[in-house]
Image (tube, rainbow, N blue to C red):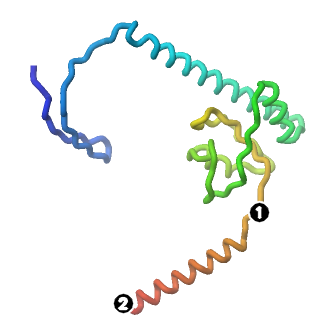
Amino acid sequence: MISLEGAVDVLTIGSKVFVYHVDAVKDSYLPELQEVITEVVDDYKQEEAKSLAKSTAQKVLDKLLENLKIGRSVDDSLTLAATEHGLEIKESEPFSRQGKRMEPFTSLQGGENIFNLTKESPVAEKVFEGQEGYYVIALKNISPAAMEDFNNKKKDIEAEEEQAKLKLDDAN
């Protein structure tokens, strides 16, 4: 049997390159069920709970969309759907594309989808998974952009660009 201990090699996967060094080699073994039964049962329960949570979130979304189709408001539709499944409604603080976001908007998928919602289409058509569970995303309100802040920042950026141009001209 050849020992790999102390071996060094380079592994390329796509455009990434990994250098690895084998510090120690252990023989593999298959543990007895009694050694891992608690972990196996806990993992199974966790997967079942996750599946049930996703299924419940999908039912809430379906009920919400159904209520919207018959003319109920987003707030009423969401309240009815959540209450039917014994769930609470959590609202995020108002935020912008550049501002701090809370779950599930911190994920790229959930974060980008929220900005596709409109008053005419106020509910995301799918359930999103976050670190704390599954989410149904509905738009409650749209606030106009703070143009004063934008205009002030725009002036600052324009001034910085002008300074950079002057420095470049001086260097030439």
Sooner in the amino-acid sequence: mark 2 or mark 1: 1
Q: Amino acid at mark 2?
A: Ala
Which residue is disc 1 drawn over?
144
Task: Specify few, some or many for label 1: CA neighbours under 10 Å numbering under 14, 14-19, or 20 or more.
Answer: few
Horizontally, is 73 left or right of 136 in the view?
right
Horizontally, is 80 left or right of 154 in the view?
right
Q: Is residue 28 above or below residue 155?
A: above
Which residue is disc 2 drawn over?
171
Give how far apart the Cα atoms at labels 2 and 1 are. 43 Å
**Quadrant (top left/top right/bottom left/bottom right) for the N terminus:** top left
* Residue plotted at (57% across, 37% down): 131
The location of residue 168, given as percent across then percent down, is 41, 87
Horizontally, is 52 left or right of 40 in the view?
right
Circles 2, 1 touching at the beta carbon (< 8 Å): no
Task: Please identify the quarter of the rendering in which residue 50 is found.
Answer: top right
Q: Amino acid at mark 1?
A: Pro
**Quadrant (top left/top right/bottom left/bottom right) for the C terminus:** bottom left
Count of marks overlaid on the render: 2
Q: Is residue 74 above or below residue 47?
A: below
